Image (cartoon, rainbow, N blue to C red):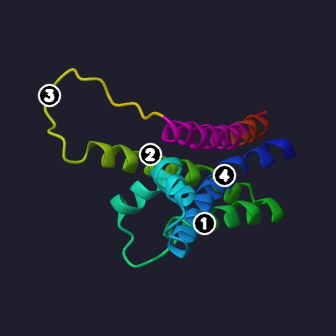
């Protein structure tokens, strides 16, 4: 049972780690704008987070994505420490929602300004580092959500018997 509870932490922790790495890179770039490595990391590796910041327009709130990810990890840890399964499951499911918003905003950014018409054109699949972040965020979040749903289905089955 404790394995399923810990498995639910994967989604919020993966989301927090990737958002923290992107925000640290952006902050370091603001501190050292002449660094070619930081420009590469910000533009190419963590491009999905840069695009979602611009699309969602959080206004003047800096590090809004990191704040949301930190709240989700704190909610998950509180659920684990207090043994409240609902807090842990809510954090797990909300991490999937946040990952979905990141992915949608990146897709929206890539299709911005293009003429949209009814056609049979294939959907653009991301490549490079964006694709790896898509897989990482979705795999971690889906594993976490599946563990939380399995936990509750198991509890329902035991209560019915």
Q: Is residue 105 visible?
A: yes
Mark 4, Cα crowd under 10 Å, few <14 / some 14-19 / many 20+, is many
Question: Which residue is identified by label 2?
Answer: 103
Q: CA distance from mark 3 to mark 2?
A: 23 Å
Q: Quadrant of residue 91?
A: bottom right
Question: Which residue is identified by label 1?
Answer: 24
Which residues make up the magenta segment? 128-150
Question: Which residue is identified by label 3?
Answer: 118
Quadrant containing the N terminus in the rendered view: top right
Q: Nearer the viewer, mark 1 or mark 4?
A: 1
Q: Residue at x 24, y 47 (%)?
A: 112
For marks 1 and 4 on the same chain, the one whose residue lies earlier in the sequence: 1
When the figure is inspected, residue 5 is found, relative to residue 156, above or below; the finding is below
The reply to whether the magenta stretch includes residue 138 is yes
Q: Residue at x 75, y 41 (%)?
A: 155
Q: Residue at x 76, y 63 (%)?
A: 77
Q: Nearer the viewer, residue 13 or 124?
A: 124
For marks 4 and 2 on the same chain, the one whose residue lies earlier in the sequence: 4
Q: Is residue 1 visible?
A: no
Q: Does dot 3 land on a helix, a strand or a loop?
A: loop
Q: Nearer the viewer, mark 4 or mark 3?
A: 3
Q: Nearer the viewer, mark 1 or mark 3?
A: 1
For marks 4 and 3 on the same chain, the one whose residue lies earlier in the sequence: 4
Where residue 139 sits: x, y (%)? 62, 37
Question: Which residue is identified by label 4?
Answer: 89
For marks 1 and 2 on the same chain, the one whose residue lies earlier in the sequence: 1
Secondary structure mostly taken by the magenta-highlighted segment of the chain: helix
State if disc 2 and disc 3 touch (CB < 8 Å).
Answer: no
Residue with the most extreme bottom position: 60
Q: Nearer the viewer, residue 120 or 28?
A: 28
């Amino acid at each position: 049972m404790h394995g399923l509870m810990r498995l639910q932490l994967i989604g919020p922790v993966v989301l927090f780690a990737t958002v923290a790495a992107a925000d640290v890179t952006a902050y370091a770039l603001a501190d050292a704008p002449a660094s070619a490595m930081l420009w590469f990391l910000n533009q190419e590796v963590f491009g999905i987070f840069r695009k979602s910041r611009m699309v969602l327009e959080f206004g003047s709130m800096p590090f809004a994505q990191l704040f949301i990810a930190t709240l989700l990890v704190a909610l998950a840890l509180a659920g684990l420490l207090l043994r409240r399964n609902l807090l842990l499951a809510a954090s797990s499911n909300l991490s999937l929602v946040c990952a979905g918003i990141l992915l949608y905003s990146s897709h929206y950014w890539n299709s911005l300004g293009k003429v949209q018409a009814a056609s049979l054109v294939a959907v653009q699949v991301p490549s490079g580092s964006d694709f790896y972040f898509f897989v990482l965020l979705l795999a971690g979040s889906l594993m976490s959500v599946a563990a939380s749903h399995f936990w509750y289905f198991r509890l329902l089955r035991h209560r019915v018997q």
